[in-house]
Amino acid sequence: MRRMVLNLIFALAGLVVGALLNVLADDLPARVGPSAPHCPQCKHRYDVSRWLAIGRALRGGRCPQCGTPVGRRYILAEVVTALIFAFLPSLIANPIDLIFAAAYVAILILIIIIDLEHRLILHKVTFPSTLLALAGSLVISNNSLLQALLGAIFGFVIFYGLYWLGKQLFGPGALGFGDVTLSMTLGAMVGFPYVLFALIIGIMLGGLISFGLIASGRLTMRSYVAYGPFLAMAGIITVLWGEQILAWYVVG
């Protein structure tokens, strides 16, 4: 019963965090300071009862000032964040680990949203997040400062090498430098050797999904594919199941 109550509390927290991520996903790429939830079109600030996109959808689904409808991303971000948060207490028992895992998941969801919409991985997100992860490594049970530092360095070096190689072979833009800093952040979050699994999973996800889109005709061989969302999804997977993946690899 206590676990169910905790799951519910985290689900509700996920809704609120999802609303915050929506604000940050709008404001950070626009280079403006985050503010209260507002209409992306006319900047009208919603009253408290409309802070959640789900709440706005239930109250007509439009901005009360300009009539702009609630975008699907806003609702999806809240629902996905709430669902992941709801399962966190069932996956992670240690309270400190649980809090940091929730923070890491929220950061990675934010990176996914911004990269999908703007093709940007912002240094103002990755660098503070790396510092947060390094600080977190001092108190969480499944990482250490040495592991976090090694993970951050490993992630940066590996993807900087891919970034340089892609630039030499295909020209600028083959791989963004934001992917390099994101790999550094993932390394700090999950530590070494877990970062290795995160990077492999991210590359595999990117390759498989890109291949599927090309095979279906939705993309061509010359289409731009953002790897940031795949790396961030792999990061979420590793944050939640990194120990199980390592155990499976060692046993296998």
Image (tube, helix red, strand yellow):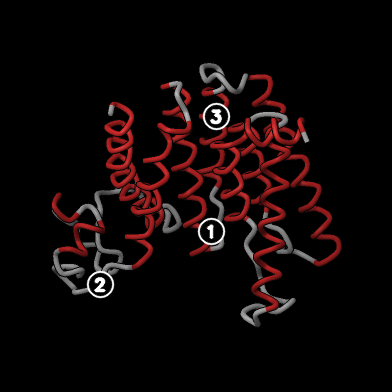
Q: Quadrant of residue 94?
A: top left
Query: Disc 1 versus disc 2: distance between alpha carbons?
Result: 22 Å
For mark 3, what is the residue? Answer: 133
Q: Which residue is drawn at 68% across and 23% down?
A: 147
Nearest the viewer among 195 and 180 is: 195
In the displayed structure image, the side of residue 5 where residue 106 appears, left or right: right
Image coordinates for residue 26, horizontal then vertical, percent:
38, 58
Q: What residue type is labelled 1?
A: Asp
Q: Are marks 2 and 3 in contact (CB under 8 Å)?
A: no
- Quarter of the picture containing the N terminus is top left
Depth check, front residue: 235 or 66: 235
Disc nearer the start of the sequence (1/3): 1
Q: What residue type is labelled 3?
A: Ala
Corner quadrant of residue 69: bottom left
Residue 191: x and y in percent read 65, 29
Q: Which residue lies furthest to the bottom in this view?
A: 217
Assess disc 1: are there few (<14), some (14-19) or many (≥20) residues with their C-alpha within 10 Å of its C-alpha.
many
Residue that numbered label 1 is attached to? 115
Q: In which quarter of the image is the C terminus?
A: top right
**Residue displayed at 25% across by 63% down:** 39
Residue at horizontal 61 percent and vertical 47 percent from the top: 234
Q: What residue type is labelled 2?
A: Pro
The image shows residue 93 at horizontal and vertical percentages of 45, 24
Secondary structure of the residue carrying numbered label 3: helix
Q: In this view, does 216 lie above or below 21?
A: below
* Residue named by callout 2: 69
